[in-house]
Amino acid sequence: MPKPNALPEVAPRPDADRIALLRNKAEFVRLETLRLIQIAKVGHYSSVFSCAEIFATLYYDAMRLKRGEPQWPGRDRFLMGKGHAAVGLYPLLVDWEFFSKDVLDGYTRLGNPLGDHPDMRKVPGIDFSSGSIGHALSGGLGMALGGRAVSRKYDVYVLLGDGEMQEGQVWEAALSAAHHKAGNLIAIVDRNGFQLDGQVDDIINIEPLADKWTAFGWQVHEVDGHDVVALATLFRRLKTDAERTRPVCIIANTSKGKGVGYMESEPGWHLGYLAPSDEALAAEEIKRGGIAQ
Amino acid sequence: MNGPVDPNSWQYREINARAPGLSYLSDALIELVEDGHPIMVGTADLQYSNGLVRFAQRFPERFTQFGISEQNMVSAAAGIATTGAMPFVATFASFLALLCCEQIRTDVAYSALPVRLIGHHAGISLGFYGTSHHATEDLAIMRSIADLTVVAPADGPQLAAAIKASVNHARPIYFRIGRGQEPVVYDNGVDFQFGKAIAHGGGSELTIIACGQMVHPSREAFHALRSAGKSVGLIDMHTIKPLDTKAVLAAAARSRIILTVEEHNVLGGLGGAVAEVLAEAGSPARLIRHGIRDEYSLIAPPTHLYRHYRLDAPGIEATVIEALD
C-alpha cells in the first residue's frame, strides 16, 4: 500500500530561468491588478496578491495551454471559487493571447466583458464562470468526469478561497470527487486567513483543514503559496504521477495583500481603492520585491 | 461509475411496474446513446424513483450517482457540459427548482451550457410526502431564468419525443415531469417541437390550455364537454418557455374564455405566462387560471388531492361548466 501522500521521488525542480520567469509573472499580476483596479475605482487587490504566485506558477509552469487557443480541447482547466481574484488573471489571459489588450484596458467599462467576477460566456480563456462562492469545485468535478466520457486527458485546477470552506457545496463536491476517483482534479486552497468580515477562523473556524481534506479521501499537500519553487516542484511531481486516482488538495499558506506592507497588516483590505499616491507606493514596493522570497 | 444494478431487485421491478411513464425516460436516453450521442446521466439518490436505474444498468459508465448532493450535481453537470458531453441530471422537481435554483441560474442557464435538468414528481404528485416534496413553484422560478427552456410533457411518449428532440436544442432545458403514473395521451406517437403547442380542437366558447400531467384529465373533460354540445377547445402547451404566443392569441381570438390548467400555483406558471400574453395583446378574452390557488397543498394520496383541488377530469369539467354559466 502506498503511503497516503506518496509521490514520485523524482521532482524536477524549475531551473533558474524558469524561477525568474515565475517571479516576474507574479509581479506582473500585482502591477496589472493595481492598474486595472484604478480603472474600476474599486476591487479586490489583496485577494489577488495572496494568489499571484499561484496564478503565475499554474499559467507558466504547470498548465498545458496553447497560445491563442483558449478553446483547445486538450488544455488543462482552471476554475476559481474565489472569482473576485479574476482581475489578476485577466492580464495573464492577454499574455497567452486569448484576447486583446484593448479589451483588458476597458476593464469594467460599459459593455466590456471583464468584470470583477470571471464570465466564461464573455471572456476567452475563462473555463467556468464564478461569483457565487462554493460552486467551482463541483464544476471542476464535472469537467473531470466529462473528460473521462469523451476520452480527454487533462488536469482540472480549482482555486478556492479559505473562507469558501464554509460553503456546504464544497464538501458535497469533496465527497463526490473522492468517491468517483477524480484523480485529475486538483484543488488549491488559498489559505490567506481572511474573509470580508474578518479572520476566517474567528468567523467560522475551518481547522484542522488538512485533516478534513484527508478525511474526505483527498491527497493533501501543504505549501508556502508565495514560494514559486515549492509550488512548481509540487505541481511537477503531481504531473509525473499519472496513475493518480485520488483528487489532490493543496493548502497554499499565503498572506492576504502579499507584496504591499500596508495591505498585509490591514485585514480591511479585502475590497478597496487606492488613491494615486498610495498606488504609487504600492507599485514601488511590488517592484522593489517587497515579497519575501 | 456505479456498481451493477440487479434487474431482479425489488426496486428495479417495482419502478417499471408502478411508474411505466418513467421507463420512457431511460429508454429515450438509452436510444440516444445507441445513436452515438455523448449522453451522461446523473441522479441524486433517486435512481429507483425516476427509473434511471434502467439506464444505469445498461450504460453504467455513463451514469453518475451523486448521492444526496443536488447542488453539487447541478454544478457538476455544468462542468460536464463544458467538455462536449451532454448531461441529463434528475431529481425531485421540488429539490431541483428550489434547492438548486442558483446553480441552475448561474452555472447552467447564464453560462448557456446544454444541461438537461429533469424535475420529476412535480406538482402535488408526491401527495402525502408533504410540502417539502411538492413543487408548485418550479414553473414560475424556472420561467424567470433567462435562456432556460421550460418543458412540461404530458405523458411518456411526449417525454421521450422531447428528450430525443433535445439533442438538437443547444440551450439548457428544464423538463418538468410527473411520477410516471400518468395515463398516456399520445398512444399513436407524437410530433414534438420545442415551443410549438399541440391543438386538440378549437371552440368558440372556451379553450382549455393545459400542460404536463394536466393534459390527460383536461382532454377527458374536453371530450365530455364536446359530447354535451359545448364548443370547447383544448391546447397542450407543453413548452412553457418559450411560450407559443401565436397559439394563445389564436385561441383568444376564437374563444370567449381561456382556461389554463396546471398542477402548480396559479401565480407565475402557465396561467401567469398566458395572462401576460393576453394582457399585452389587449385581448378581450376572459382568462381563468385553474390550479393551486397560492396555498400549500394538503396531505393526501395524490388521487385524493387531484379530486380535492379539482385537477382531475370531473373537476376540470365542472370548472369549465361554471365558467360558461
Image (tube, coloured by chain):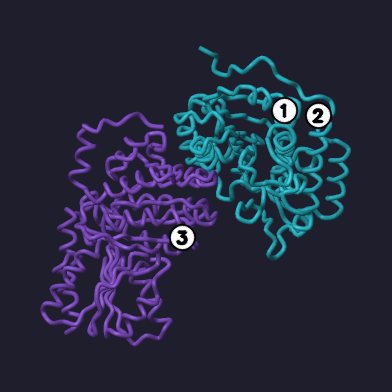
Is residue B77 placed above or below A7 in the rendered structure?
below
Expressed as whole percent of the image width and height from the top left, the position of residue A32 reads 79, 48
Query: Image check: B133 left or right of B231?
Result: right
Q: In which quadrant of the rendered view does residue A248 lie?
A: top right
| Picture disc at residue A138 | none
Question: Which residue lies under the disc numbered 3?
Answer: B148
Q: Which residue is mark 2?
A: A19
In this view, the residue in front, A103 or A278, is A103
Q: Which residue is mark 1?
A: A232
For the residues beneath circles 2 and 3, the answer to whether they share a chain is no
Dot 1 lies on which element?
Answer: helix
Amino acid under disc 3: Leu
Report, in whole angstroms, how far the alpha carbon at label 2 lies from the one at label 3. Answer: 47 Å
Q: Amino acid at mark 1?
A: Ala
Number of the front mark, 2 or 3: 3
Percent from the top left, x then y, of residue B123?
A: 28, 58
Residue at the extreme left: B228
Question: Which quarter of the figure is the C terminus of chain A placed in?
Answer: top right
Determine contact: label 2, label 3, CB under 8 Å: no
Chain that is purple in the image: B
* Separation of residues labelled 2 and 1 (CA atoms): 9 Å
Q: Nearer the viewer, residue A51 or A124?
A: A124
